[in-house]
């Protein structure tokens, strides 16, 4: 199979129209058989539920070419179950989890020519999505839904790749205390758009959101969970009921304990203790972010600098990064069930 002629080493995190996408429709109370199609456009009613009441959930995972030339993806079963949780919260029918994994495999296989070559620094981003497509005018769930998966080759989420980033504490909230922060709904990202545009204008790569109830605890950023390393070299992960349960973060937790022998604590983390210098390293983690080191946090004009600095990743983040990406790209043996071979 011949790869597409792209400048793989210089891809940004951007959308390319690729050859095939998977579509299944929920109509008359059931999912149809689904199929790969080539048309990247969607035609729908001007009154589709998604357009008015934002009934939309999505997922993000990646496919990789491994060192020995296979194509694999990472823990798609967890995306399937998280999407089912997201759908339930928005009163949508879940797409069957086994069919979700099969559809990811089928879509990536059909677009194999778009999977960036091993070692290029790029990967194939897989975007499953589901939304209400039938008309609704009173506030209620739609009757019909489209489930769809497309893929796009991507480079690093943050410019500069693995260089530490500068982020700020946001005055806006992305979630509500008993809202939808824990699911992957498009509406959470709508909430964050003004804040991210404003952050970028002011020179920050991302926003750190505080817990919306008390605004004293660290939650996550607009597109990634946050992890810290304390002075003893152990991993501290902020716990909250209003953050997205990141699959990358759950994997890092396991890798830190079982591959690197670190102590891992998931607990509430206050902004105050970050200011007091309790942590020597900080990073953002997610499918798109992988592990992106944070060099400095700005809190209303006050800089909180981590000893790891703005030049390179700190030593513990680097070990976590090397181990996680080593597992994803087939250089390090994965825990049972983490890697799904596509071809
Ligand atoms: N938090 C938010 C708000 C996200 O959008 C993402 C991306 O999916 C993550 C965390 C990381 O989750 P995952 O590691 O499952 O990609
Ligand atoms: C992902 O990491 O998959 C996400 O959905 C984050 C998004 C900001 C691109």
Image (cartoon, helix red, strand yellow):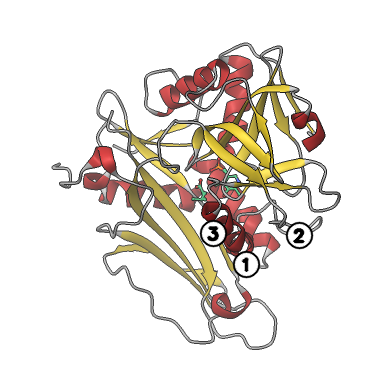
Helix, strand or loop status at disc 3: helix
Q: Mark 3 — residue? A: 197
Comparing 327 with 84, the one in front is: 327
Closer to the N terminus: mark 1 or mark 3? 1
Q: Of the residues tagged 1 and 3, which is closer to the observer?
A: 3
The circle on residue 179 is 2
- 292 to 140, vertically: above or below: above
Quarter of the rendering occupied by the C terminus: top left
Residue 218 seen in the figure: yes
Residue 232's spot in the image, x, y percent? 71, 12
* Location of residue 92 by image quarter: bottom right
Residue 195's spot in the image, x, y percent? 61, 58
The circle on residue 320 is none
Task: Answer with left or right where residue 44 lies relative to residue 69.
Answer: right
Q: Of the residues tagged 2 and 1, which is closer to the observer?
A: 2
* Location of residue 227 by image quarter: top right
State how far apart marks 2 and 3 are (Cα): 23 Å
Residues at circles 2 and 1 in contact by the CB criterion of under 8 Å: no
Q: Of the residues tagged 2 and 3, which is closer to the observer?
A: 3
Closer to the N terminus: mark 2 or mark 3? 2
Helix, strand or loop status at disc 1: loop
The circle on residue 92 is 1
- 185 to 229, vertically: above or below: below
Residue 217's spot in the image, x, y percent? 79, 41
Closer to the N terminus: mark 2 or mark 1? 1
Residue 109's spot in the image, x, y percent? 29, 46
Residues at circles 2 and 3 in contact by the CB criterion of under 8 Å: no
Residue at 63% x, 11% y is 261
Quarter of the rendering occupied by the N terminus: top left
Residue neighbourhood size for the residue with mark 1, other residues' Cα within 10 Å, grouped as few (<14), some (14–19), many (≥20): many
Task: Answer with left or right where residue 149 lies relative to residue 94.
Answer: left
Query: Residue lying furthest right in this view?
Result: 214
């Amino acid at each position: 199979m011949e790869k597409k002629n792209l400048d793989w080493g210089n891809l940004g995190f951007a959308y390319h129209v690729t050859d095939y996408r998977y579509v299944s429709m929920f109509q008359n109370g059931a999912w149809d058989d689904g199929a790969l199609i080539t048309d990247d456009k969607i035609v729908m009613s001007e009154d589709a539920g998604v357009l008015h009441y934002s009934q939309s959930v999505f997922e993000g995972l990646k496919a990789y070419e491994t060192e020995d030339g296979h194509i694999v993806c990472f823990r798609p079963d967890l995306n399937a179950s998280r999407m089912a949780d997201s759908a339930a919260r928005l009163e949508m029918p879940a797409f069957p989890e086994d069919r979700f994994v099969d559809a990811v495999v089928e879509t990536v296989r059909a677009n194999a020519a778009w999977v960036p070559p091993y070692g290029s620094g790029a990967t194939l981003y897989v975007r499953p999505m589901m939304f209400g497509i039938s008309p609704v005018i009173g506030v209620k769930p739609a009757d019909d839904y489209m489930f769809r998966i497309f893929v796009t080759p991507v480079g690093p989420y943050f410019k500069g790749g693995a260089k530490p980033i500068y982020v700020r504490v946001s005055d806006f909230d992305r979630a509500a205390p008993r809202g939808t922060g824990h699911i992957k709904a498009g509406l959470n990202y709508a909430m964050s758009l003004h804040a991210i545009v404003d952050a970028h204008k002011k020179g920050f790569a991302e926003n750190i959101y505080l817990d919306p109830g008390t605004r004293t605890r660290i939650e996550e950023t607009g597109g990634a969970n946050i992890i810290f390393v304390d002075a003893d070299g152990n991993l501290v992960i902020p716990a909250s009921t209003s953050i997205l349960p990141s699959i990358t973060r759950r994997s890092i937790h396991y890798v830190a304990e079982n591959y690197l022998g670190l102590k891992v604590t998931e607990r509430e983390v206050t902004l105050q203790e970050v200011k007091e210098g309790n942590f020597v390293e900080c990073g953002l983690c997610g499918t798109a972010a992988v592990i992106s080191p944070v060099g400095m946090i700005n809190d209303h004009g006050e800089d909180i600098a981590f000893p790891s600095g703005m030049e390179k990743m700190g030593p513990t983040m680097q070990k976590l990064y090397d181990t996680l990406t080593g597992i994803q790209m087939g250089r390090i043996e994965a825990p049972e069930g983490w890697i799904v071979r596509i071809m």
